[in-house]
Image: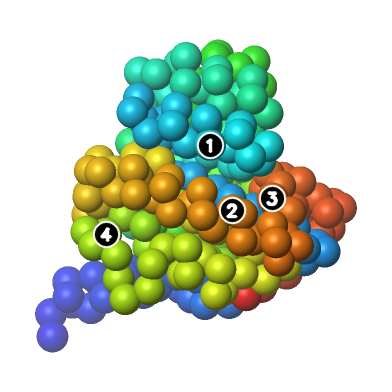
Amino acid sequence: MSILFKLIVLFILIYMLIPFVITRVWGMGVAVRGRAGRQIALTFDDGPDPLYTPRLLDLLQKKGIKATFFVLGSKAERYPELIKRIYLEGHQIGIHNYTHLPNWLMSPRHIREKHVGRTADVIERITGERPTFYRPPWGILNIGDLFTLRKTYHIVLWSIMARDWGKERKKKPLKERILSRLEPGSIIVLHDSGDTFGAVPDAPGRMIADLEEALGDARIQGYVFVRTDELLRQAHGARNELSDGLRVG
Ligand SMILES: [Zn+2]
């Protein structure tokens, strides 16, 4: 084995795999769920989208539900009126990088400045409020992110990944995929845009229709939908407690 090969393996291990085990397997350093009563949080990634985000907002408004949107800075810049609407309707806005690039391929400094900070600037310019919650694309962090980003941002992953972006409904419909795994404190990830690599363009249309059914059933089971910041505030108080010790559900 050449020395170069060994170095590459070592780099992948330290830069990618260790943070993956810490955050995704152990659920440390990030929030994946809250512990509050029967509260749960809906989160929507990859938007805003000019077609689907307004439809989703209409649904949430009709049902009186507040959610969290992890938006891309580049799209927020292109559709400021959607960001404004999300904000004015009482939803939480979080950051999902400037463009949908995995953190494994970028340096911590580049991510902090050109993706997270830049997106926070864009959102602050539109709403007047600087976002403090961050979810990396695909939930992927590098080892540096765990040190640099956590100083400023709450890093939020999820406990229920409903796989809403795919081509056809899997064996179980989306509604069941969400409801069968719901528990107090669940953070559910869905997508209000279908133009991310690997997604089907019209998937959000189906997601919105299926979600409408799931919302009613979840409420019958006594669940209350809240924003992620509220969910985690209820679970704990202080920021450090908030980002430490929340386990994968
Ligand atoms: Zn994403």
Q: Earlier in the sequence, mark 1 or mark 4?
A: 1
Image point (23%, 62%), residue name: 168
Residue that label 1 marks: 59
Nearer the viewer's eye, disc 3 or disc 2? Answer: 2
Q: Quadrant of residue 138 in the image? A: bottom left
Marks 4,3: beta carbons within 8 A: no
Q: For this rendering, which residue is in front, 115 or 126?
A: 126
The disc at residue 215 is: 2
Name the N-terminal-most of marks 3 and 1. 1
CA gap between label 4 and label 3 equals: 25 Å
In the image, is residue 85 above or below residue 201?
above
Q: Is residue 36 left or right of residue 159?
A: right
Q: Secondary structure at mark 2?
A: helix
Instruction: Give the image location of residue 89, x and y in percent.
Output: 64, 25
Contact, mark 3 vs mark 2 (Cβ under 8 Å): yes
Residue linked to disc 4: 166
Q: Earlier in the sequence, mark 3 or mark 2?
A: 2
Pointer 3 residue: 225
Give coordinates of residue 176: x percent, y percent.
48, 70
**How far apart are the two marked residues, 3 and 2, measured between alpha carbons?**
9 Å
